[in-house]
Amino acid sequence: MTRLGLDDGADLEDDDWNDEYDLDGEFDGEDADRSFRDDADAANLERENAGDDEEAEARRQVDAELEMNLRRAELHHVELELKLVQSEEEVRNAKEALQKAEAEREAFQRRAHQAWEDVGVAEKLIEDERARREEEDAARGLAERQAKAILRADEWRQKGNEAYRLGNSLDAERHYKDAIDTLESCGITLEEPSHLTLRTNRAAALMALGRMRDALTECELVLEINPCNVRALSRAGNCCVKLGDLAAARKHVDGISLSPDATDEDLNAALEQHQKIITASVERDRLVGNDAYRNGDYLEALRWYDAAIDAGKEAKETESVKTIKVGLHTNRAAANLMIGKPLPAAEDCCAALRLDGTHTKAQVRLARCLLQLGDFVEARQEANDVIARANAELQSKAEAKNVLRDVEIAEGAMTDVGEALKRAEITTRCGADADPAFDVHAAATKALDDLDVAMVIAPAVPDFITLRAEALRLVGKIEEAQAIVNGKKSVNARRKALEVRLQFDLGNVTSCVEAGEHVVDLLQMLPALRAAEEKNKKREEAGGDANENENDDEDENEDEAALAELASIPDPEGLSQLLDRANKVSEFKDEGRDAFFQGNHQHALAMYQESLLMAKGAPMLEGLFLSNICACEQALGRFADALSSAGTAVSIAPTFVKAHSRLATLYTELDMLSDAEAAYKTMMKLPLEGSEEAQARTNLKAVSARAKNSRPVNWCKLLGVDAAATAADPSIKKAYRQLALTHHPDKAGRGGVSARVAAARAEMSSKLFKLVGEAQRILTNPTEKAKWATAKARADRQDAYASSRSTYSDPFDSGAYSHYDFQQRTSSTGRQSSHWASEFYADDESDDDYYGI
């Protein structure tokens, strides 16, 4: 029981348990039952003890069997250990035997390899000996063949020389080639001087046969061996000349002078050859230039003529070279004339005549150049000289006669057109009453036609350009007139006077005053000019010579050139008055601008009105000052007057962007949105800058959106009355009467403005007169005014609603119209802050670079 782990005290535990749960004898009637249970427990205990003994026996048997198995395994392990020791001993013995065998094998391998190398060495010795013997035999055979070839080649050379001396170049070339082939076939490299002579001789024969390319190849083969070979260099240079490669020819000839083998004779020949190359180069360029001229490519012809003349500078001055140079200068003059450059053409003609004073073609072309330069006296003299020459060519004489005819036409056109334009200028200043029979526009148009004919003959005459610009100005094409003289230096007083007038017409007052500084000294001589004219007139009436008593009038002779310059100016009195007007306009403009910035808009308005009168006859200036007047009137709250000024400015100067902008802004501020939309669309058609176009596009979009709300015209602002005024307020009728009187179409020419301004203002006044009448009708009728106020309030609400729902800020509220901020114009008098006024006006003054103001 102990081995099985049973405890003998178990019965005691049961008894203890029974004692522990004894109920103090309260169930004495159950003693029999307790005895029965005790017997049963004893029987159970005996059975358990018997079972424990059997289990113990079974375990002893198992333990004995396991012990036996352990002993057997240990014996088997010992047996295997012994066998393992024996096998390891056998392995060690086998390894030792293997190592010994491998060592023997490696030794045999080394000996076998060495033996094989000995075989290779023996074979190589045999092969080298065989090759040496073959080379010796081949060299002996080659030497024999080369010796025979040299002898044979020398025979061919002698035959070639003999044939060349006899002039049989074909046989000579063939013999030289046979000699070369004979040597090369035997492996002889042609590098000995005698061998190179064969090639140079063959090159000479090939040149005689005209085979320049093959001859050049032979020379180049020689130069690869000996770059200093004089014969090869000389003949290569000749070949290049014939082939047209003059740069290569010059390179070869220059190589002769650097060759240490060159003799004095060679150097002299090289110099002659160099001159031939230069002559060939000049002639080639001349012919190519002539081809380009015949094809009408005058710029290409000039390029080749320039190259030929530059190359000819190195040529020796021989008669043939001189003749070529004369032709080159004459041809280049013709090309320059064709592209409208008479001055360099005249220089070429003079260069040709210095080389050959009898070259009539150059002299005739010089006369043509002088004609195109406006030097009619010299042109006539050169042409007459050609006609008077007995040995002159008939073609040259005929061309000289044509030059004389063209001189007469050009001189006549210059005189007639110049006098007609002077008369037109005086008539323009004094008015049609001064010369009723003279039509300025017709005279200027005829002058343009006459100049078209004359400028075909002489297109580059500066005086013709001046006269053409004067005529264009008189027919109203100011920009075109400015374009043809822009960037060209003033050549005389007439051109300077034209620049003064053009700058004034274009509205560039500052530039006008600056240009006038060049003629102001001449204009101060006006009394002297008139006195001289009066004196000459009296002398002519007395039958005397206007040039007599020259020695007594030395002071007048000193000023003769200046008086002639002054006399050439059209209407110098008018020019002097124009400069005075320009100076006053500049002063008034500056004073008006300063007054505007200081908030003195009434004084600024007066200054600009004075400037408008001074600018009479200059549409650009009139448009500019009308635009500035509009700014002043708008700043004073006189919107009807401002609308009239802006509309007139647009009509007078349709390309003035600021006038269009102000007109559109006024329409917008007066809620005349359809008119504002049309004004912006018209403005968009003008050439605008990027920022101007973007702003105009934004404003047009905003105005178009507001126009959909059927907003009525702001009649109160148009009349300049308080929006709170009742229908019976006398200020409405007073404002109406004043505006109706001011803007009556019959009053458009008030104030001494030009006829053009009066006509434009009359057209605008017709519209304003109707608008003012409509404003008076609505504002003095309580019912109509109530309807108008209701419609205006509805439009305001719609605008506010649209503004709140838009994804972008309304340009009327957020600054797109910051120059015309409605909130800054709340007083009934129309006064604005000086800050707004300066911003509004500053944009106008930013146009200084555009119109010069």
Image (cartoon, rainbow, N blue to C red):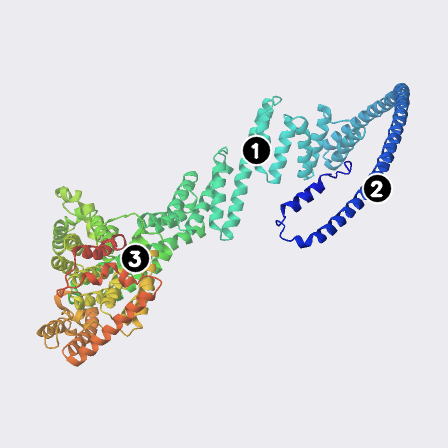
Give the amino acid type for the residue marked by disc 2 in the picture: Glu
Give the amino acid type for the residue marked by disc 3 in the picture: Ala
Of the two numbered discs 1 and 2 on the same chain, state the one appearing first in sequence. Answer: 2
Q: Percent x, y for residue 567?
A: 19, 52
Binning the other alpha carbons within 10 Å of mark 3 as few (below 14), some (14 to 19) or many (20 upward) gives many
Of the two numbered discs 3 and 1 on the same chain, state the one appearing first in sequence. Answer: 1
At x 15% / y 76%, what residue is drawn?
779
Which residue is nearer to you in this view: 402 or 129? Answer: 129
At x 17% / y 44%, what residue is drawn?
559
Residue 464 visible to the viewer: no
**Residue holding disc 1:** 250
At x 69% / y 33%, what residue is drawn?
218
The quarter in which the C terminus is drawn is: bottom left
Callout 1–callout 2 Cβ contact below 8 Å: no
Residue 221 visible to the viewer: yes
Cα gap from disc 3 to disc 2, whole angstroms: 147 Å
State the SS at label 1: helix
Q: Tell which tag, 3 or 1, sits nearer the viewer.
A: 3
Give the amino acid type for the residue marked by disc 1 in the picture: Arg
Q: Residue 54 carries which label?
A: 2
Q: Percent x, y for residue 239?
A: 63, 36
At x 32% / y 55%, what residue is drawn?
483
**Residue holding disc 3:** 481
Image position of 515 (left or right of 738)? right
Of the two numbered discs 3 and 2 on the same chain, state the one appearing first in sequence. Answer: 2
Cα gap from disc 1 to disc 2, whole angstroms: 138 Å
Which residue is nearer to you in this view: 521 or 477? Answer: 477
Cα gap from disc 3 to disc 1, whole angstroms: 54 Å
